């Protein structure tokens, strides 16, 4: 097991708690970010710190020296999306490189479950980034932020857009290129092409079609 310390949120709940317990059983080192220290689980190799999603300073301190964090969605509230953005921005400022963000199946603007509608905003942002790169490839972070604001009315910070780009890069959908001090972002369609080729439309060319 790696000696890297993993940041874990939601350890007082069901999903985050199960993840934390299984990581502890595997010998992983963890830093549990909780809102109430009295509710933090006592697990081997884990230390708990008080850091609510909306407390940027506390989150930044808690995530110092951590490169990967599990972010379990906050409970439903009027400022839930803003809490998530605050957490992501603070994580980026602390030097976190990978945020494992727990989303919802069927996220959509008209989803019956209100939290799924919130999660659509994140998915929509990534789709818009790819749309813009498809229209004009090789854009800088500044150019993407400007376009997303002017053309689509998105109010996300540069750090939030940077995190979305990091997720797309980890998925292989975005590649980067350095040109002097400038970092350019390119849309890589190959992963999507592979998916389309694996599941083509039903018909005679489908791999499962009868002969």
Image (cartoon, helix red, strand yellow):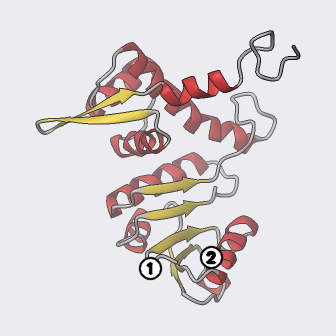
Depth check: give the residue in front, 189 or 164: 189
Point out the image quarter for the C terminus: top right
Q: Label for residue 23?
A: 2
CB-based contact (under 8 Å), mark 1 and mark 2: no
Q: Would you identify the image quadrant in which residue 112 lies?
A: top right
- Where is residue 84? Give x, y as percent: 53, 52
Residue occupying the point 44% across, 79% down: 3
- Report if residue 40 is visible in the image: no
Residue occupying the point 54% across, 87% down: 45
Q: Quick one: SS at disc 2? A: helix
Is 140 situated above or below 33? Answer: above
Q: Residue furthest top?
A: 204
Q: Residues within 10 Å of mark 1 (few under 14, many from 20)?
A: few
Left/right of residue 12 with respect to residue 63 in the rendered view:
right
- Where is residue 128? Give x, y as percent: 49, 25
Left/right of residue 32 with respect to residue 164 in the rendered view:
right
- Report if residue 26 is visible in the image: yes
Residue occupying the point 33% across, 20% down: 137
Which residue is identified by label 1?
3
Residue occupying the point 39% across, 25% down: 149
Separation of marks 1 and 2 at Cα, in angstroms? 12 Å
Q: Residue furthest left?
A: 180
- Where is residue 143? Give x, y as percent: 28, 26
């Amino acid at each position: 097991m790696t000696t890297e310390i993993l940041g874990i949120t939601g350890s007082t709940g069901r999903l985050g708690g199960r993840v934390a317990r299984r990581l502890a059983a595997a010998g992983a080192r963890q830093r549990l970010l909780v809102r109430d220290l009295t509710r933090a689980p006592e697990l081997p190799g884990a230390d708990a710190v008080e850091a609510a999603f909306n407390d940027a300073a506390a989150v930044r301190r808690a995530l110092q020296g951590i490169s990967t964090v599990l972010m379990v969605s906050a409970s439903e509230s009027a400022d839930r999306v803003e809490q998530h953005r605050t957490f992501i921005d603070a994580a980026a400022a602390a030097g976190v490189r990978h945020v494992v963000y727990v989303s919802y199946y069927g996220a959509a603007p008209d989803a019956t479950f209100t939290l799924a509608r919130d999660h659509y905003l994140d998915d929509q942002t990534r789709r818009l980034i790819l749309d813009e790169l498809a229209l004009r490839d090789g854009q800088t972070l500044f150019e993407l932020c400007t376009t997303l604001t002017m053309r689509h009315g998105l109010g996300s910070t540069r750090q939030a857009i940077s995190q979305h780009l990091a997720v797309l890069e980890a998925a292989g959908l975005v590649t980067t290129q350095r040109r002097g001090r400038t970092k350019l972002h390119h849309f890589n369609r190959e992963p999507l092409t592979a998916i389309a080729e694996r599941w083509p439309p039903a018909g005679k060319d489908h791999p499962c079609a009868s002969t």
